[in-house]
Image: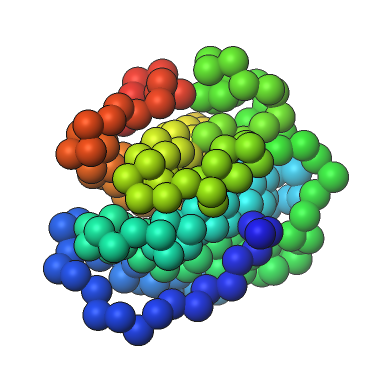
Amino acid sequence: MTTETSVMLDTTPQPRRRFPLVGLVALVLAAAALVLFATRSGTPGDTSPEAGFARDMAVHHSQAVEMAFVIRDKTSDGPLRTLSYDIITTQTAQRGIFMGWLQQWDLDQASSQPPMAWMSGHAHGGATAGTTPGVMPGMASEEELNRLRAAQGKDAEILFLQLMIRHHEGGVEMAQGLLRVSDRPEVRSLAQHIVDGQTAEIKLMKGLLTERGAQPLPSILQSPAG
């Protein structure tokens, strides 16, 4: 399975939601971003923090969507299916915004720069957690993805929650990093939304893990969210 997962949602009625309609908020943000495109002069350059953030977060979101599809098709648990649906819809919409920004800025969607090069000189969670420099924080390894694909039942639910909590922590670190280095309003607005939304989902997922008698993986955040 690649990270470029097509969004094909089933039509099964979704259970009562336990958390905010973040997908709807993302669509509102998309409309706001389009207005800002038309009113703001000047665009970020190819090596700017904004361009690097958009490219890296698009890849980061793609993996989250992939993992959410995997658990959605494995579990019958209502809250967990609803969470996976929200991750799929919200992060797919946000990824579209990132790609739209790059197109609007007349920049390529890919870059020869390594991941997180836009954060040069600014510490991020991966550095403090001992991960390899140049790797986006919170990303699951191929071995971890294979374990998730092979797992079944409660084991699959626990592994998904553990991996997604860490993945969200990485997303929070990246968005906080952008907030430290950018003054561009539409990018800061979406970055703050990612911080707020994914911090709330981290708290939710920790609760779902507790219900299953499990604990999160060691946090990669300097100040753990939730």
* Residue 57 visible from this viewpoint: no
* Image location of residue 34, percent across then percent down: 50, 73
Q: In the image, 104: left or right of 152?
A: right
Q: In the image, 189: left or right of 38?
A: left
**Is 42 in front, or is 102?**
102
Q: Residue at x 22, y 62 (%)?
A: 78
* Image location of residue 101, percent across then percent down: 61, 64
Q: Residue at x 63, y 52 (%)?
A: 59
Q: In the image, 136: left or right of 24?
A: right
* Residue 213 visible from this viewpoint: yes
Question: Could you tell me which quadrant the C terminus lies in?
Answer: top left
Q: Residue at x 23, y 42 (%)?
A: 208
Q: In the image, 65: left or right of 10?
A: right
| Quarter occupied by residue 42 | bottom right
**Is 183 in front, or is 51?**
51
* Image location of residue 216, percent across then percent down: 34, 29
Q: Does 50 sit above or below residue 211?
A: below
| Quarter occupied by residue 66 | bottom right
Question: Could you tell me which quadrant the N terminus lies in?
Answer: bottom right
**Is 31 in front, or is 217?**
217
* Image location of residue 32, percent across then percent down: 41, 69
Q: Residue furthest bottom?
A: 11
Q: Residue at x 16, y 58 (%)?
A: 18
Q: Does 163 sit above or below residue 128?
A: below
Q: Does 216 sit above or below residue 73?
A: above
**Is 86 in front, or is 104?**
86
Q: Does 57 sit above or below residue 92?
A: above
